[in-house]
Amino acid sequence: MSIAGGYYKSVEAAAVVDMNCVQLFCKNNNQWRAKEISEKDVTLFQEALAKHNVQAPLCHASYLINLASPKDELWEKSIEGLKLEMQRCEMLGIPNLVFHPGAHVEATLEEGIDRIITAIDRLHAELPDCPVTLLLETTAGQGTCIGHEFEHLQSILQGVKAGDRVAVCLDTCHIFAAGYPISDEKDFKETFKKFAKLIGFDKLRAIHLNDSKKDLGSRVDRHDHIGEGKIGVEAFHHIMNDKRFKKIPMYLETPKGEEDGVSFDEKNLATLRSLIA
């Protein structure tokens, strides 16, 4: 939800469509600089969460950040950028900060993963008491983006020194585009058997629920409305009724807009809730 007009506006927007959790940016996601957060911003945000009983606020980090970059200038800038976002989350009382692991560009995959681990270790050393957990997001695997194989995230989680301060956010569109089938029940079970073995459900802290405009294994990240894309409604039925996901907050990143006076957010939410047995 948009933070235009104040962080509390994102909570109010979520409440209007009867959502009980919310994802937001804690700064402009396409800029490095950030406007200072005031005490009033924090108070209004926390009051809105309490008033509307919106829980598990989740912050999504800037798309500019690339902890895997082989270019020192961008790598350093990315570390500072993510550090700033961790501090802003702490101020706002947001427990989890999700970010895309990064792209290794002309470097090797292994070198990219090492850069990510080194960057996260440095962040933890510089912010030893920050309570914010960094969530590595599963990716579709466009270009040289890291995170489209569960093994990538496993390597990072195992490589980081303070492993308890890092977890995972799973995106349904991304894993499908990356080549993990989840529509058929048999495929769904097999995919999450792999996830459990390589990452573990104890490391799953958030789920982005999105259908995919592109095919299985396309490695193209294009989100669609629930049940209207290539994944189809069956996969979301499995997720909605799998006890392993019962206490994991789930967030829509489906296209915005409305149809016949009903917002797409309301429509997607109603579809998901209708699938709960």
Image (tube, helix red, strand yellow):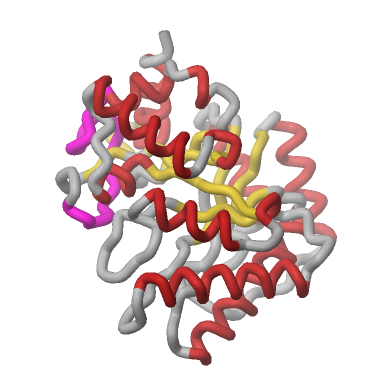
Q: Nearer the viewer, residue 165 or 20?
A: 165
Q: From the top left corner, tell me how far across and down residue 71 is, in percent.
A: 45, 89
- What quarter of the picture does the C terminus occupy? top left
Q: Nearer the viewer, residue 213 or 12?
A: 213
Magenta stretch contains residue 231: yes
Residue 84 visible in image: no
Q: Which of 224 and 100 is in front in this view?
A: 100
Q: Give the range drawn in magenta.
A: 218-234
**Looking at the image, which residue is at 24% across and 36% down?**
181
**Looking at the image, which residue is at 35% across and 40% down?**
172
Q: In this view, does 74 lie to the left or right of 194?
A: right
Q: From the top left corner, tell me how far across and down residue 194 is, in percent.
A: 38, 37
- In the rendered view, tell whether residue 262 sits above or below residue 35: above
Count of picture labels: 0
Magenta stretch contains residue 92: no
Q: From the top left corner, tell me how far across and down residue 43 is, in percent.
A: 82, 51
**Looking at the image, which residue is at 54% across and 39% down?**
204
Residue 22 visible in image: yes
**Looking at the image, which residue is at 25% across and 22% down?**
186
Q: From the top left corner, tell me how far across and down residue 94 is, in percent.
A: 70, 50
Magenta stretch prevailing secondary structure: loop
Q: Quadrant of residue 235?
A: top left
- In the rendered view, tell whether residue 25 sits above or below residue 190: below
